[in-house]
Image: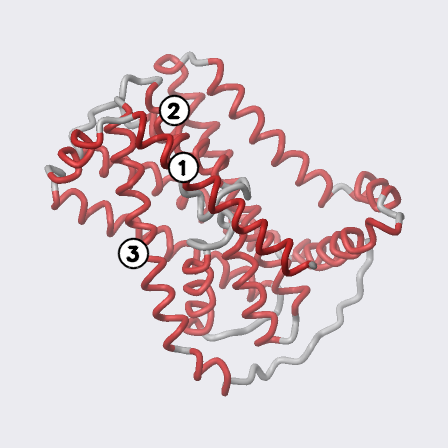
């Protein structure tokens, strides 16, 4: 029954993604879209593609740093394999959460330390979200004279509030203990245990404030590279708007595509790109073309990640991680 529910859940997300895409294709001039893509500036696209790679490199080093902070010592090659697999599965699983689950399972099985691995993946995602809010906040602050759009400000307030709520629940002992008590019900057993384990492992990082700070710094760089990549894609397609809009809109688009209602953010990313860039005069055809090129970049890197993951199956099976489970005292 559980397997059937999971299959139906995935199918529903596939349907949602393709329904959005079909709707968007009906709203645009397809001939104009293909004309825009066929006349793109290739040198600029190549530069944008290389810029896009920086994000993957920064993400790799951020996670590897968090793993070391949790006491999990792995070769860079092994971390690359795991994160490559995660990038591949992001294409087929809900949002980017699916890829996080797969890399968690991969390294948890390899290290025999599932709680620590899950905590590093969660912190990796949380620091990324923190960087997203920081970049968006700075962009809105410095570019408000150009924007002055209440819906943008409202979107930022929502994503910032979500981040604040998560941080308070995880790092405020009083509120955490209150929520923990509320979850003392038979139906909330798994959720409660998962929250306790996550809080336990994240508590370990209280002695690694430098790692957490560096993780956020890397996240800010990652969230800054993404708008720059989109800006280069836009220039290659003949779109000329102020770069500040990319620093405001891309974090919003990224936050929305995190919602687990589509496959790899497909459809949702395109719709939000059209919606936000329409506010600064970019036509639907151009905005959709920009989003499709960005997805093509994601697709290429995901396929390369899949090849790395598949070609190292034998290597992963015969490899044994020497570290043993370490039990740390927990003092909430």
Q: Secondary structure at mark 2?
A: helix
> Taking 197 as reference, is 236 left or right?
left
CA–CA distance in space, label 3 to label 1: 17 Å
Q: Earlier in the sequence, mark 3 or mark 1?
A: 1
Quickly name the residue at label 1. 269
- State the residue at coordinates (76%, 51%): 191
Q: Earlier in the sequence, mark 2 or mark 3?
A: 2
Res. 285 image quadrant: top left
Image coordinates of residue 149 in percent, x first then y, are 43, 14
CA–CA distance in space, label 2 to label 1: 11 Å
Q: Residues within 10 Å of mark 3 (few under 14, many from 20)?
A: few
Q: Nearer the viewer, residue 46 or 15?
A: 15
CA–CA distance in space, label 2 to label 3: 25 Å
Quickly name the residue at label 2. 276
> The N terminus appears in which quarter of the rendering?
bottom right
Give the label on residue 300, or none.
3
> Taking 40 as reference, is 75 left or right?
right
Query: 179 above or below 65?
Result: above
Q: Earlier in the sequence, mark 2 or mark 1?
A: 1
Q: Secondary structure at mark 3?
A: helix
Task: State if disc 1 and disc 3 touch (CB < 8 Å).
Answer: no
Give the label on residue 138, or none.
none
Q: Residues within 10 Å of mark 2 (few under 14, many from 20)?
A: many
Res. 121 image quadrant: bottom right
Query: 86 above or below 54?
Result: below
- State the residue at coordinates (64%, 61%): 3
Q: Nearer the viewer, residue 46 or 68?
A: 46
Image coordinates of residue 171 in percent, x first then y, are 72, 44
Task: State if disc 1 and disc 2 touch (CB < 8 Å).
Answer: no
Q: Nearer the viewer, residue 49 or 8?
A: 8
Res. 291 image quadrant: top left
Q: Residues within 10 Å of mark 1 (few under 14, many from 20)?
A: many
């Amino acid at each position: 029954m559980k397997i059937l529910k999971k299959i139906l859940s995935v199918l529903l997300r596939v349907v949602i993604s393709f329904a959005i895409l079909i709707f968007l294709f009906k709203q645009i001039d397809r001939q104009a879209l293909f004309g825009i893509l066929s006349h793109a500036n290739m040198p600029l696209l190549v530069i944008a593609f290389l810029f896009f790679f920086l994000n993957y490199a920064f993400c790799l080093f951020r996670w590897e740093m968090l793993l070391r902070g949790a006491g999990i010592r792995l070769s860079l090659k092994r971390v690359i394999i795991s994160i490559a697999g995660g990038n591949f599965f992001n294409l087929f699983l809900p949002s980017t959460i699916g890829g996080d689950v797969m890399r968690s399972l991969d390294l948890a099985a390899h290290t025999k330390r599932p709680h620590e691995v899950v905590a590093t993946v969660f912190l990796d995602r949380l620091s990324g979200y923190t960087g997203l809010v920081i970049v968006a906040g700075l962009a809105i602050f410095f570019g408000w004279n150009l924007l002055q759009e209440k819906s943008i400000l409202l979107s930022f307030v929502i994503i910032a509030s979500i981040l604040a709520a998560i941080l308070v629940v995880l790092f405020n002992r009083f509120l955490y203990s209150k929520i923990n008590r509320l979850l003392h019900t038979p139906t909330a057993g798994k959720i409660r245990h998962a929250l306790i384990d996550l809080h336990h492992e994240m508590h370990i990082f209280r002695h690694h404030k430098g790692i957490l700070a560096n993780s956020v710094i890397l996240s800010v760089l990652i969230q800054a590279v993404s708008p720059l990549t989109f800006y280069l894609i836009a220039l290659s397609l003949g779109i000329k708007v102020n770069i500040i809009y990319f620093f405001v809109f891309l974090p919003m688009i990224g936050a929305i595509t995190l919602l687990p209602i589509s496959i790899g953010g497909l459809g949702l990313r395109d719709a939000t790109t059209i919606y936000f860039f329409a506010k600064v005069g970019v036509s639907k055809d151009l905005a959709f073309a920009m989003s499709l090129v960005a997805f093509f970049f994601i697709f290429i890197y995901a396929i390369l990640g899949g090849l790395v993951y598949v070609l190292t199956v034998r290597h992963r099976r015969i490899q044994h991680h020497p570290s043993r489970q370490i039990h740390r005292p927990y003092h909430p």
